[in-house]
Image: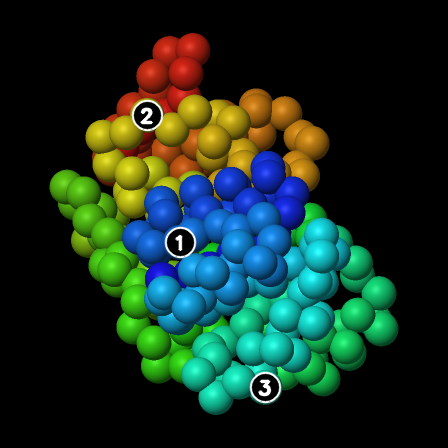
Amino acid sequence: MIYCVEDERNIRELIIYTLESSGYEAKGFRSGQEFYEALNKEKPDLILLDIMLPGEDGVEILKQLKSSDSTKNIPVMMVTAKGAEYDKILGLDSGADDYMTKPFGMMEFLARVRAILRRQGRNVNVMDDVLEKGNLKVYIKQHQVIADGKNVELTLKEFELLKVLLENKGIVMTRDKLLTNIWGYDFDGETRTVDVHIRTLRQKLGGCGELIETVRGVGYKM
Ligand code: CA
């Protein structure tokens, strides 16, 4: 279970959506107060903490967490719009395990979440390490793609695109959803970016490229 304390609704919902679609259980809270209530009932494996919050701010919440025996071992990642070095030091000195500055891409965010959980030896990820479809195999940890028995070199974005499609087999992924997932919610490029990457991805996958279906006017599905 991952808890996210974030007062900005759009960001909170996006974070929860991203975590849930990657196989994590996640709950969002608007304030420290809501968060503490949940914390009394269930202790999460990771806490994502915004700094600027109504009422008690993220740094105060972090200090509170680290000063109590029942919560001090739960990893905390500070997620904040404030990027100043000062905040970073403040966050890390109070015992945060990681720090992320908004805006950020969702794939990077997920990678950081996984890294923290791995360091903690917390095995909460339900996602398989190998994603497969037909003659296509994607090894997530090794970042390796095998199509028809051959190794395929992909760029990071192409790899992420393929991974998201495979994780959502049979589900139509809209261009907007793919953009948000891979390029981040602040990306102001066009949805055509997705089409361009899909095209090169299909080419590189050869025969397996046909596994990616175009759903006219909507997006793509595996
Ligand atoms: Ca905030």
Disc on res. 145: none
Please identify, in this view, whether the residue under mark 1 or under mark 3 is nearer the observer.
Answer: 3
Labels 2 and 1: the sequence-earlier one:
1
Real-space CA distance between mark 1 and mark 3, rounded to the nearest whole angstrom: 24 Å
Provide residue 51's location: percent of width, then percent of height: 71, 61
Left/right placement of residue 156 relative to residue 204 reads right
Q: Residue at x 22, y 30 (%)?
A: 170
* Quadrant in which the N terminus appears: bottom left
Q: Residue at x 76, y 72 (%)?
A: 88
Please identify, in this view, whether the residue under mark 2 or under mark 1 is nearer the observer.
Answer: 1
- Amino acid bearing label 2: Val
Real-space CA distance between mark 3 and mark 2, rounded to the nearest whole angstrom: 46 Å
Q: Place residue 129 in its image quadrant.
A: bottom left
Residue tagged by mark 3?
A: 67
Disc on res. 26: 1
Please identify, in this view, whether the residue under mark 3 or under mark 2 is nearer the observer.
Answer: 3
Callout 1 crowding tier (Cα within 10 Å): few <14, some 14–19, many ≥20: some
Q: How is the image coloured?
A: rainbow
- The extreme top residue here reads 217
Tell whether circle 2 marks a residue whose Cβ is less than 8 angstroms from ligand 1. Answer: no
Residue tagged by mark 2?
A: 172
